[in-house]
Structures are given as structure tokens and as C-alpha cells.
Amino acid sequence: MSDPIYITGQGLVSAYGMGNEAFATAYNGRVSAIRARTLFDAPACREERAAEVPDFDPAPLLGKRGLKSCDRSTQLLMAATELLLGRLGLADREARRARFTDEEFGIVVGTLGSIKSIADFDLETIRNPQYVTPTLFPNTVFCAAASYVAIRHGIKESCITLGNDEPSALSAFGFAMGRLRRRRARHIVVGATHELSEIYALGVQRACDRAGRPAPILGEGAAAFSVEPASVASERGAAPVAELLACSALFCPEKQRAYERNLEALRAQAGAGVLEGVAHVVSAEKSDLDDLGPIRGGARLHRLYPRLGYLSAAAGAFGVAAALADRTVEEGAVVLVNAASDRGNCASLLLRKLASA
Amino acid sequence: MKPEGTKRIAVTGVGVVSAIGLDRHEFWDALTRGASGISDVQRFATAAFGRSRGAEIRGFDVTRVFPGEPRLERLGRAKQMMLAATKECLGSAGAGVVDDPFRVGVAIGTTMGESQSLEAVTDAIGAGLEIPTDAVLDYPPSTIPQAVAERFRLYGPNYMVPNACAAGNFSIGQAVACIQAGEADAMVAGGADAFSRYAYSGFCRVGAIAPDVPRPFSKDRKGMVPGEGAAALLVEDWDRAVARGATIYAEIVGYGESCDAHHITQPHDAGVAQAIRRALEDARLEPRQISFVSVHGTGTPTNDATETRALRSVFGEHLPSVPVSAVKSMTGHPMGAASAIECVAAILSMHHQFLPPTVNFEEPDPECDVDCVPNRGRPFPVSYVLKTSSAFGGNNSSIVFKTAERRA
């Protein structure tokens, strides 16, 4: 009999603030985190609202050492992971080694990196090539955030970054599920991070202008989840908050067809009747629930966008976080979390909520 | 170790665009001759960097590869190269690869993605101009596997695995996992990177670029030379490949990953060795069964010494009898495309039973006491090849290929 894969904890840094409690309280209070933008002043970005992580200062949580050379997306992920591992009693490496060797502990992160870091570094290259700051160079690679977290926490099983637009985080869950089922790892931190910046916002504005539609309200944040087989969780007395049932991620220019194929794949993985039991559908995006029309049945819909803005590669992670935090999603409920990009990537994750996180 | 009954994995197609050849035939011919793809950088002025050499690809024109598709000219260079490599790969794979588009996926790695598009954006910002929309839309790394999927109608699992300079190996590992999990029957897997100004600048500042050429494992080595390129492998369920009568270029019998968790830019031998051990364990092989190692071999003092220590810790007394070749001595360092390009080289070396050389080798280094096939390639019986790769962040990935009976 197969060993179920559980989520046993989460750590969130969101536009609601630092921590799971801030998220759960505001989310259940149906609060919108969207406010006037403060991170940068860019008249060319006509949408002046954003869902920013308020007053983000990771130093009290992480200490100041080494933080200066990490960009915002890395700091967000480091903070989320610290919160996660702290709650689980696994932040201290020695304490963790009583449960897992470093070689059994992996990380997979969904992110598109920091366009700000890359652009800043390249601008410096244009202006003062002899004086670019070497310690900022690693931020130009997309796997920087995951790698810095792995170094901080001694995560040695593997360190993977996936960058598939909005479905990135859900792809990361699917990746972790496969890896744990193949017994390559005993515990995986699944994370996602997305930062707000002026150049990112300008890029989105230009793309939306080209497409003739208004720019979305942009959000940001990072999430980290503890994912492990039931047998491992049980050994260390960890209480599961969700069972991961199935995941599918693919590319298809026709979004509805993509969702249909994803659902077929979920059915094949989780059993024929499981989709009929879906009670809740969560989407972090603006529009993709419309494409789910014919297949969503009587499930209740949850949209994150009106509260947390457009979260890009972190979208799916906050979809999972919302399902776990939402008190109207009852324990035992089967939840479908979706994320899709306009360019054709599409992912669906099926989970059973076991407890509120 | 993979469980009994795990699906066997075949490589049934290969394609490559590199600084030493624009397809697999040119590439292999250049490898056997020990040709160099390194010359003075043309894409941007290098005077301020104190270094001037690069491995830029000359003569690549996407419209020649795809006549009648002028829209591809507007895509970023990484995508153009990846599309060309994929076309060759699928062309070499024979008929019947894509019967159900949802059963064939794409997994591609990169280090910098469409860096030249991002550079167009920063050029505009630096000049006080409006940022170019085309460049903005072209930039995200996800657009590389998307472009491949769209052009070739491959609607299965789709992954961008941007694990820096080991990304090609990581993407092949992910492709194997997708097939073994039953999510796809075949995957186009590989890597792509375009020649990047900010990568050049960054590597200069960390002192990693050689003044002339890379000299992997040579005592006087002074660094690597940045490059560009793309490579694609068609990774396929073995039984399906046999059923459709495909030419099987190689079998992927082992795969392993690790993370050093040590330093963001400095590799660590324990992590490199761990990925190798995992790949060998997955393949159920002893180190002495490996015929040949296609190494990461950048030519930086630190990398080559670290990699040698890792190999020594795994191979022990057998190491001197295992040839070790650094393809980057010829191709330069094509970043996220590197390990995929080197996988193509490894597969071709099995196909031709010939080892590509490590060129520019001058003087043995006691810290790098390996048989690096110095300067001249040689015929050699190759059964199993180990392909190692390492990256920023301490991300390591190793693959073991087995020579397959040719079924053409």
C-alpha cells in the first residue's frame, strides 16, 4: 500500500504580514491586503495599488548576517522557511539531524527569480563594469533563493528551482510528491517566492498595454510547506494538515483543454471518483476559474486575487495556504487548487484538508 | 536506488547548437578534431572587463533552420537555439514520436534565460528610453520550454528547471522522472542560454574568466570562458521506443542529485561526490564499471581541483584508469546549456566509441591527477558514461548513460 504524502506545516510571509496567524486572521476576516503602493514610485505604472508585504524586515527573524547580499525574493523565502522550520522544531540543524540526515532533506521552489536584481546588476555593468558588486552576482541566477535557503539550513538532498509562470509552485508540489514516492528524499520543503519591484511592474504594464487590457494589481509574498510521507510524519509525531492526492502540470495554448487534461491526469492518479468529491476550488488568478466552468460542478469557488493581488510564481502556493487557512473549508474536504498562465502553462493540485493550518 | 520494475529510459534523439558546430554532425566532427569555439567577443565591448574572449556561436540563423517562419526571428536567442536543437532532435528520433501531444512533454534548463532580452530592457532604462515591450515579453525563462511546446505541439508536462550551470542535467533528470511516473511517454529535455553581458561582467568580477582559453585540469589553468548554446535530447520510455522501431542512442540507467549547502559560488567536493554516488547507486553500478567521465570541467582552479577530489573519493584507486574529458575546453562554458551539450557529446562518444579530448592542456597538476584525454581524442571502448555537472548554489547533478544496441 502506498504511503500518503502529507503537508505537515506551512510558513507564510504575505501581504497580510509575517506568519500563518496574520494570514489566517485576515483571510478569514475577508480582508483585502490591497493598498496604495509604497515600495516604489512609478508614474508609468498606472495601477497604483498593490498587495505588498507590509514593512518587511527579516533581520529580527533571520539575523543580519549575509542578508545584505540577498535580494527581496530570497529574503521573503528565507523568512517563510524560517517560520516553517521554527514551527516544526526543525530550524536548528542539530535538532533536525535527530530526525533527518541533511542528505534526506530537500527543497524545491517555484519562482521566476528577481528581475530587479538582474536589471540592477546589468545596469551597473553598463555604467561601471569594473565596479559591479561580486556578492550581488549570484542574485542574477534564478535558483538563488532556493540555494541560499539550502545553505542556511544545510539542505543537501537536492535543491531544485522551477520557473513555470503562475503554475510554478504547484509544479513544485508535484515534483516533491514524485520525489518522495520514489524515496529519493524523506522530507521536502516546497516553497515559492515572488517580489514586487518597479521594473517588474513596468514590464507587466507594458505587456498589458500590448494586450489592450488593464494591468493587474500586483502582489508579492513567499510560502514554504513541509511535505513528507505519512510514515515519516508519524515517526516524528508530526500532525498532517493536508494529504496531497494528485498533481498535474502541462502546457496547452487552449486553457480549458489544458484543465480538462489536467483533471484526467488527477483522476488517473487519485482514483476515478475523487473529482466528484471536490468541494472547493481555489484559484489565485484573475480569470482561470472561468475556464473551469464546465468541470467545476457544485464546488465552492475561492478567488485569491481580490485579496492578495497577482502573485505570479507564488500563486499556487498561496492557493494552498488559503485552502488550509480558510475556516469555511471543512476538515476532510477535497480541494482543487489551480494556477494557469496566459502563455499556456497550467497546473492543478488535488488535496484533502485534514486540519486548519 | 530505483525499485525493480522501474521503466527503462532510452535516448532516441539528439540535437545541438554550439560554438563548435550548429548540428550534431558538425559538433562531433569538431569534438574529434579538438576544435575551439573561442574567439574575441563581438556582441559587446569588453575593454572595461579586462577579458576579451568568449565562445559565441557564429553563423546561427534561425530562419535557415525554419524557412518560412519569420516570426521566430523575433524570439530571443536562447529560444531560437533551443528550437533549432529540438528540430534536429525530433528529426533524428524518427517517426511516431508525437502520436498524442499530451503524452510528450518538455523540460529545459537555463542559467540566465533570455539574458539578451533583459539586456535590451536595461539598455533602454540606461538610455532613459521607454522599455521595449517585445523584450519584456520575451524575457521570462518559462518562455523557453513554452516556445518548444508551442512550435512542436508538445502538450505534456512542461518544466523550466533554472538550476544554473547544471540545469541541463537537472532537466534531463526531471524528464526521466516524468516518464517513470507515467506522466509522459517521451520528453524533450535539454538546456539553453544566450551569450550574456551581465554573466560576463559577473564572472569577470569573481575572477573566473580565463585571459585566453580554458585549460581544464592543466596546472596553469586560469578560468573558464563564457559561451552559449542549446541542446536537446529526446528521452523516451524504452518499450515505446522499441515498439516504434526508433534508433536508440543510449539508455539512461542512473541519475543522482545533491546540494552542497556550503557556499553560493564555491563548489564542495562532498556534494559533487554525493550526486555521483547517487547516480551510480541508481544505476546499480560500481565505479570501476564506468568507462568514461564527461566532467563539468570548467577550467577554473577551484572547480577542477574540487571535481578531482570528488572523483577520487568515489573512484578511489580506479580513477587513473578512467578517462575524464572536459568538453568546455572547446565549447567554452555555455551556462545552462552546458551539461545538456555535454550529454550529447557523451552519447556521441558512446555511439562512435571515441573519447573527445580536453584541449589546451599544457602541464599536469598534482591536484588534478586524472587522465583528461589531453589534447587529442582517442578510440576507446565505451559502455557506461558518467556525466557530472555542478552549479551556483552548490547544485549538483549526475547522469549515467549506457551504450545501447543501435536499432536503426
Image (spheres, helix red, strand yellow):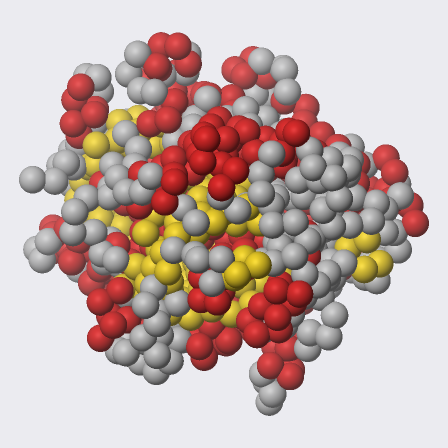
User: Which residue is found at the position 65% from the left and 49% from the top?
Assistant: B374
Q: Nearer the viewer, residue A15 or B244?
A: B244
Q: With respect to residue A185, does B132 lie above or below? A: below
* Residue A19 image-quadrant placement: top left
Q: Is residue B11 visible?
A: yes
Q: Position of residue A252 (x, y in %)?
A: 38, 69
User: Which residue is found at the position 53% from the left and 61% from the top?
Assistant: B379
The reply, left or right, for residue A211 in relation to residue B5 is: right
The reply, left or right, for residue A312 in relation to residue A103 is: right
Q: Position of residue B110 (x, y in %)?
A: 56, 53
Q: Nearer the viewer, residue A84 or B55?
A: B55
Q: Position of residue A14 (x, y in %)?
A: 47, 32
Q: Is residue B105 visible?
A: no
User: Which residue is found at the position 57% from the left and 74% from the top?
Assistant: B25
Q: With respect to residue A74, does A65 lie above or below? A: above
Q: With respect to residue A249, does B73 lie above or below? A: below
* Residue A133 image-quadrant placement: top right
| Quadrant housing the C terminus of chain B | bottom left
The reply, left or right, for residue B76 in relation to residue B222 is: left
Q: Position of residue B330 (x, y in %)?
A: 68, 57
Q: With respect to residue A107, does A58 lie above or below? A: above
| Quadrant housing the N terminus of chain B | top left
Q: Residue furthest bottom?
A: B68
User: Which residue is found at the position 22% from the left and 49% from the top?
Assistant: A246
Q: Nearer the viewer, residue B247 or B341?
A: B247
**Count of marks overlaid on the render:** 0
